[in-house]
Amino acid sequence: MTRARQLGATALLWIALLTMPYWITAIGGYMELASRVVVMALAAMALNFLLGYTGTLSFGHAAYFGVGAYGVGMTLKYLTPSTGLGMLIGMVAGTLAAAAIGALIVRLRGVYFAMVTIAFGQVFYFIAFRWNSVTGGDDGLTGWRRQPLDLAGIRVDIQNHDTAFYYLALVCFALSVGAMALLLRSPFGRTLQAIRENERRARFLGIAVERHLWLSFVISCAFVSLAGTLYALLNNFTDPRALRWDMSGNFVIMAVLGGMRSFWGPLIGAAVFVVLQDYVSSHTENWMSVVGLIFVLVVLFFPRGVLGLLQHRG
Amino acid sequence: MLQLILFNVFNGLIVGAFYALMALGLSLIINLSGVINFAHGGFLALGAYLAYSLMPLVGFWGALVVAPLLTAALGLAIERLLIRRVYGRDPLYSLLLTFGLAYILEDVTRYIWGPQSLPYPIPAVLTRPLSTQFFFLTGYRLFMVALVGLAVAALFFVLGRTRLGIRIRAGTLDLETVSALGVNVRVLRNLNFGLGIYLAGLAGVLAAGMLGLQPTIGTSLIMPSFVAIIVGGLGSLPGTLLGGLLIGVVSGLATVFLPSASEAVIYVMMGLVLLLRPRGLLGEEGRLK
């Protein structure tokens, strides 16, 4: 793709995102679905920071997504009715959890790394599931609502206006995506890609591979936990399913479905997956089979994803 | 108190034996083919439900023999149709593929046998407690431990003494050379996959008698199996066996002292192992992949 076409496509993408509240109902969607697409896209792009650019497969990102979700929910329920503070706490909690677990796993690679991330994801699931008195257990964390934002005296009512919440999510998305793009263009980001292409050679060049992997894991999880806080705020609710293994799998399939070797691929993948899942689960009891079939078909026929396919043609 | 501890340690051993049986199957497949079979739990559930449906026809003992074999046959077919296509590719794809399969298997199980849990009848011979003081030592539990022990012994015999087993072990070390020596690697991987699924099906039939039948029975057992493999050390089957029993006993003990943490404790243990000995208790040196 030429540079001009790339710029044009990116501009088109942003226009679509900015105007989504005005056409989503016209094509049969609803406001909440639009917000969900943006939140899941953020999660999938954050995962892809690690998967696509560092070449490391984490199958446990739902854990940090969920820690973010519970962080904001518990702050609003028990501490203070401040959405902003809740998001900050959720994000910090998710990032700290990732920093601790990341330190344990950066020495592992490939199959081993993936398996350990899956297994560690379950710890948080069991904590949320078992610690009834605080997390609400299996029934989820209820009894709280997102609160209006107060930005330097200007009140933004994200509580009652779904459109306002959509734009909050979009602002978070834009800031995160911008930060990730900048990071990937920096020497740090180039180093990550060098490790992906040839780890041994990167090591010979004196790059501290483990430290770079750890940092990229933590950065990726920080943005995933931000997405988690938005997800909880969107639903005014969170439950252990937000941090179960199937959620991790969904993030990975979104990234792959869209195309994990392109920056915007996971956004496309998330949009397709979220809309499809919404449609299927409202039309059939057996949505699990359909989702499972999507996984199988993507692996067999679209391993490079939608954007990979387009680029291949182009 | 002593009785309570003994009860929970014994319980933990039984649960650990399940984990081990399932984890051994997973390990076989990972070692030879590099595929983390996320659908393993789905096969386990299928084995359990097949046994349930077969029981009226062939009886308890018949089902115990036939159901795991049927499950293994399905495993062979699915390997041929689907799993085979992702060998040698990034582990990402095999994970996603088996992940999708796990979804489908669970949904199909639910569709055929219904979402509610079903009772799994056990012959009266096996349900009697053997001693009044150690009430928990029912015949079924001892029988299960014995059967798992037998299955593990048979597995190690197959791997150690038979031609197939020796080829599997050789393939684990260097598949290319094994292929160059004239072994049909496609068939070898296929049989190895079937062997792993057989163990999953057997674990399913045994678990059904102990835990009852639920469509989610497999997914609840697969995570601890991953932990068992990691604790024991990837690449080492004795390690996997040890890991399974160990986490079973540890979570059994946790039930005595801190019941709410009985699930989380095994992950803490995994964290400790990774911190102190990243290759796992019996893992090969330098194997972190």
Image: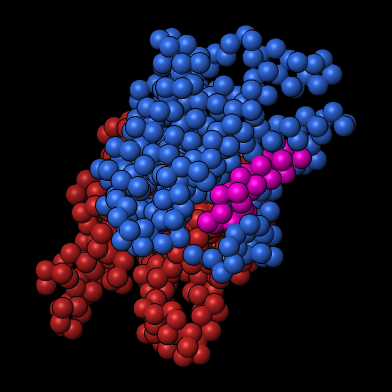
Residue A141 or residue B241, whichever sits in front = B241
Question: Residue A155's spot in the image, x, y percent?
Answer: 48, 64
Is B44 a magenta residue? no
Query: Would residue B113 be visible to someone looking at this image?
Result: yes
Magenta segment: B231-253
What is chain B's hue in the picture?
blue
Question: Residue B217's spot in the image, x, y percent?
Answer: 51, 32
Q: Residue furthest bottom?
A: A205
What is chain A's hue in the picture?
red
Res A91 → quadrant = bottom right
Main SS class of the magenta portion in the image? helix
Question: Residue A42's spot in the image, x, y percent?
Answer: 39, 64
Q: What quarter of the picture does the N terminus of chain B occupy?
A: top right
Q: As displayed, is residue B254 above or below residue A217?
A: above
Question: Residue A253's spot in the image, x, y percent?
Answer: 34, 55
Residue B162 or residue B235, whichever sits in front = B162
